[in-house]
Amino acid sequence: MTEFFQQVFNGLAIGAVYTLIGIGLTIVFGILGIAHFAHGVVAMSGGYVAFVLIEKLGLPFFAAVALAMLAGAVFGVMIERIAYRPVQKAPPINAFIIALGLTMMLDGLNLVTFGPDQIVVRTPYTHVYHFLGLVLTELRLVVMACTSLLLVAMWFFVTRTKTGRAIRAVAQNRGAATLMGVNANAVSYVVFGVSSALGVAGGALVGAMLALAPGLGESLVIKGFAVLILGGLGSIPGAVVGGLILGISESLAAGYISSSYKDVIAFAVMIIVLLFRPEGLLGKR
C-alpha cells in the first residue's frame, strides 16, 4: 500500500501541471470555441523564459515564473489578435492550420535558441520529507501548492469580478452579451491572456519537476486535450478532476506496468471517454 500511495502522490503533482494546461485549453475552447493546439508549445516556451530569467538574471524562482506568466499573457493576446482573429468566422480547419504553424515556428525557435538538449528550471526546493513511509519531495509539494493558489485565483476572477462576469456572459451567449454592451473582442483578449499565463505556469513547473526539451509542447497539448475531454468540454471543474485523474493514472501505470506506457494513458483515456461518455465526466450533453 505504501507504494500505491507513493505513486498517487507523484501523480497528484504531475496531474496538477496537467490541470493548468487543461484549464487553459478549456477556457479558450469553452468560451471562444477555438481548439488552441499551439497551447502546449506556448507553455513550453514559457518554461524556457523562466529558465532564462533564473539563470541569466538571477531572479528567484517565483519571481521568474510570475514574469514569465506576464510575458505569456501578452503573447497570448498577440496570438489572438494576429493569428486567430482574422479567421474568426472561417471554417475551423483554418484555425487548426494556424495553430500547427505556430507550433512548428515556436518549436524551431526554441531549438535554435536553446539547442536539442534537455534543460531543467533550477529551484531552491530540494528537501525530501519522509511521512508514514512515503517520500515527499519539497518541489512536488510546492507544485501542488502553486496550482492550488492559481486555481483559487482563477475561481475568484471568473466568479467575483466584472470581467469574469463578462467572460461567463460571452460563454453562454456571445450575441446576447454583445447586445448587452459586453465587448466580445476584449473578452477574447482576456481569455487568451489568462489561458497562456496558466499554460506558462504549467510549463515552468514541468521544467522544474522534469525537464524542458524541443518537442515537449506537443506532448503537453495532447495531455491538455485528454484533460479537456475527460473533464468535459468547457468545464473548468471538469478540467481539475480530469487533470488529477490523468496524472494519477500515468503514475500508477509507470509504477506498476512500465514507464514506457506512461504516455499511452492519455490516448487511452481520450478513446475510452469518447466511447462511453462523450460529454466527459462533468460536461453537459
Image (spheres, grey):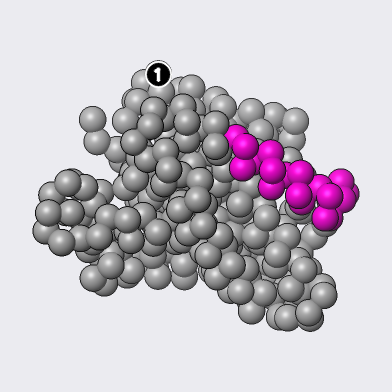
Residue highlighted by disc 1 = 275
Residue at position x 18%, y 54% in the image: 178
Q: Residues within 10 Å of mark 1 (few under 14, many from 20)?
A: few
Going by the picture, which residue comes out furthest to the front?
86
Residue at position x 81%, y 47% in the image: 111
Q: In this view, does 142 lie to the left or right of 168?
A: right
Residue at position x 23%, y 52% in the image: 170
Can residue 13 be seen here?
A: no
Residue nearer the viewer, 28 or 151: 28
Residue 193 coordinates in the image, percent (x, y): 46, 61
The secondary structure that most of the magenta stretch takes on is helix
164 w.r.t. 213: above or below: below
232 w.r.t. 122: above or below: above
Residue nearer the viewer, 201 or 143: 201
The three-letter amino acid code for the residue at tag 1 is Leu
Q: In this view, does 210 lie to the left or right of 245?
A: right
Secondary structure beneath disc 1?
A: helix
Residue 142 in the magenta stretch? The answer is no
Residue at position x 20%, y 60% in the image: 182
Tally of numbered tags? 1
Q: What segment is highlighted magenta in the picture?
A: 100-118
Residue 79 coordinates in the image, percent (x, y): 52, 52
Residue 256 coordinates in the image, percent (x, y): 69, 34
Task: Specify the quadrant that holds the C terminus.
Answer: top left
Residue nearer the viewer, 53 or 273: 53
Can residue 68 be seen here?
A: yes
29 w.r.t. 77: above or below: above
Residue 105 in the magenta stretch? The answer is yes
